[in-house]
Amino acid sequence: MSKKVSRRQFLTYTLGGTAGFLGMGMLFPMIRFAADPMLKKGGKGAFVNTNLTEGQINETPQAVDFRVAVKDGWYVPEGGEPRTAWVMKSEGKILALSPVCKHLGCTVGWDSNPQFKGEFFCPCHFGRYFKNGTNVPGTPPTKPLDQYETKIEAGHLWIGPIKKA
């Protein structure tokens, strides 16, 4: 027993299937284009020489600029992407903190507000952090500043990937 299909139903099924097939043909490359960078395996993050000697690092946080090799989708900036870390000695160890506020991503400064001496301060929404990068309770940031991995090699500070707080 076969069911008869009217001409109208046949055209509807045929055109619907063809339109779906053509639509997927157009949509698939766009999805692949958008998802391709996410599908690629990323590197584990190499360490970068800051050219700062171990003797230049003390208890006072200092801004250290460096560049990292980054691939943003298909764009690879020549010479690397500029980054900054607040570097200091803390409890005998080298501490390198990200300057990016955990509240809304603004840049924090060390000892930059006379009202809050000896703290990291975010001018966007009055976010505050203690010297070790821990957020001050009752201020907008709810997490401490991220820390970079560090190592000393040949007497120089090398900064690695961020360890999320």
Image: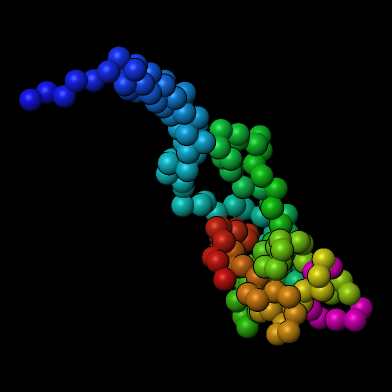
Q: Is residue 58 visible?
A: no
What secondary structure predominates along the stretch shown in magenta?
A: loop
The quadrant of the picture occupied by the C terminus is bottom right
Residue at the spot 60% in from the left edge and 34% down from the top edge: 75
Residue 112 shows in this picture: yes
Picture mark count: 0
> Residue at 36% across / 21% down in the picture?
12
The percent position of residue 152, horizontal first and vertical second, equals 57, 63
On the rendered structure, is 101 left or right of 18? right
Whole-percent x, y for residue 87 in the image: 70, 67
Q: As drawn, is 46 to the left or to the right of 137?
A: left
In the rendered image, the vertical position of residue 17 relative to residue 108, given as above or below:
above
Vertical relation: 157 (above or below) 89: above
Nearest the viewer among 34 and 23 is 23
Query: Is the image coloured rainbow, by chain, by secondary structure, or in one colour?
Result: rainbow
Q: Is residue 71 left or right of residue 124?
A: left
Name the quarter where the N terminus is drawn.
top left
Q: Position of residue 59 (x, y in %)?
A: 73, 77
- Up the image or down, 105 lies above or below 75; here it is below
**Which residue is drawn at the image coordinates 65% and 76% (left, top)?**
142
Observer-nearest of 75 and 137: 137
Magenta stretch, residue numbers: 114-123
> Residue at image x 47%, y 43%?
38
